[in-house]
Image (tube, helix red, strand yellow):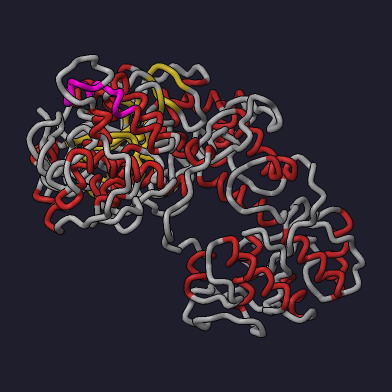
Amino acid sequence: MVNTRKHDRTPGRAPASWLAVATIVLGAGIAFPAAASASTAPAPLSLTSSSCPTNIVEGELDGCVTELQDLLNVHGAGLSVDGDFGANTLTAVKNFQSAHGLGVDGQVGPQTKAALYAAAAPAPISLTSSSCPTEIVQGELDGCVTELQQLLNQHGANIVADGDFGPNTLAAVRTFQSAHGLAVDGIVGPNTKAALMGGSSSVPAPIALTSSACPADIQEGLISGCVTELQQLLNQHGAALGVDGDFGADTLAAVKDFQSAHGLEVDGVVGPNTKAALDAGSGTVPAAILITSSSCPANIVQGEDDGCVTDLQELLNQNGANVSVDGDFGPNTLAAVENYQSTHGLGVDGQVGPQTKAALTGNAAPTGNPPPPSAATLTAIVNYATAIENGHAETGWAGGHLPYGYDGGHGATPGPSPADCAADGGDPACWTATQNGTPGYNGEISVDCSGFARWVYALAYGHDVLGASGTDVQISEMTRVSSPVPGDLVFFGSSSTNTHHVGVYIGNGKMINAYDTGTYIQTNNVSDGGTVVGYYQYGSGSTTTAGQSTNADWAKHVLADGGWPQSTNNVTVIMQWMSSEEPPSDWWDRNNPLNNGYGSGGGAGLGSYNNLITAADFAAQNLQQGTSDYGHIVADLASSAAPATTAQAIIDSPWSCGHYSGSTTCNTSGNPPWGAAFNHGSVATVAAPASAW
């Protein structure tokens, strides 16, 4: 039943019939038994999604109504969940509106939507509680997020407090961080928590009133860099305000005085006319122009004074610079640019050229080997995968259960895309689904397994770290680990160069994955995926630095595939082991560890390999899979022990007993002990023929 095609994009496995959904999880995180008819209902869509109308009314039949019925059932409506807004749903809506002090019209508009989610949201938990993680990240769904959303709303965010850390909450966090001079990473750590809860006395960095980061109408209650800028402008007109970024009573009075003095409508709201008047009388800040625009020079340098610099300064402040946004590239802006370049591995020249622009705008290609993922990133990967499985809306997806689709998720940008039954030679299961109208049909918005992994990692990292290729390329961009943790990827196939499936490992032998045609994103046992090639992590030396030439390169490939340090000690002992079996002059013909060479070996130590890359992969696998026999060797490699120490573990292993019966461990006679044959000396570095690689 297993499809033997090389790439992932549909490993035929278990029949779709075992995808039985036992519970439905709402956007607000409330789980409850699915109604009997839910299997035929449209997939739920978040009511706040752009896919749902502003007012949901009787007669509608879609996933928005499915979500509505689920929410109403949380409040005891007892509806059949079928996605059809009929008489019973209308009655339930009116009952809910009446019970919650809303206008009873039977229409599910913004107020009713908000009340439905708010009533179903997890109870708020103080951000400083031990129940909340040190770093709250996108994808989390609990009372800590409810509390976070309520605090953000107190600072003018205007988001739904549903306990779900989704894209809108992420945007609100970033806006808050930017306005309060914090590192703009979207992660709610100790500094952001303190600022939200009033524990930070820092004044938000000023933001130009015409910036997209400022609301169209700035009014009382807002605390942000937009208000800092407003107060500074008002003071230029004689207001004498304390500049704290907080639009309070004094700022309101100053705004009204300014409006009255300039013949504007006196409403205390700083809208377009008031902004224009403030700028006109104070040395106008140039309107921001995207630094990637053709209107901006290729290199923005000190001395420039225009909208390109306005945008540059806003971007720098989003990265913690705290410079005044005035459109003038002066000494402070120069220092901020140089600091940014230094901390982002760029050439420090103070000029904002293509590479610096790309990094500031989030379009920079990763350079060199990325660092190991942080605990927060790994948590975000799992949270995103879980949220998508539960039907939550994420960037690129309006919400609802997401189907597996052949070649889905391999578009120009990460996220669901149309299934393509004809891609990579075609997929019969995809065509069958098309004929039957089942999930995964040609053209359906979907993801396949590597498309899902790509999307989840892009959401967690903030850019497309894995790219649009399939599993064979993805695995080559990652580092194999011997002790997997949730957030790593688990790959399946015959070797690291012949993979067919990938899933997001979530711990306890489970993975979330796009499993096969006819299914939706789901949790499976890792054992359901077939032969495990290994667990891999992005970062920590991804895309191994080993070349493809010498015996030293091959040793590094073994170490990289095993997740062991490519240290001098480890490379030395692997080369010594190799030379103990075959002279360096033709080392590629018969190799070690465990006789895994190009010319001999095979997955079980028999037969031959297609190339040295595959040989290295199996060498690492055989060492790891036999940890009861080779545990001391593996432990020594993991700690980069001295070559003599690891060599002794090799000599004492069951492998040497099996190949050299006269070893001291085996206690037999008639042959020299293996230890006498092991090469403890230096080994010449010799290139193999290119054909061997």
Residue 650 sits above or below residue 317 on the image? above
Quarter of the rendering containing residue 664? top left
Residue 347 sits above or below residue 222 on the image? below
Q: Nearer the viewer, residue 693 or 170?
A: 693
Residue range (magenta):
649-663
Q: Nearer the viewer, residue 540 or 89?
A: 540
In the image, what residue occupies the spot 20% across and 49% down? 584
Do we see residue 259 in this rendering?
no
In the image, what residue occupies the spot 57% across and 50% down? 171
Residue 556 sits above or below residue 646 on the image? below
- Count of number-bearing discs: 0
Report x, y in % for residue 531.
20, 29
Report x, y in % for residue 485.
43, 31
Left or right? Give the position of 79 relative to 273: left
Determine the main secondary structure of the stretch shown in magenta.
helix
Magenta run includes residue 661: yes
Do we see residue 166 in this rendering?
yes
Report x, y in % for residue 659.
16, 26
In the image, what residue occupies the spot 45% across and 44% down? 49
Magenta run includes residue 657: yes
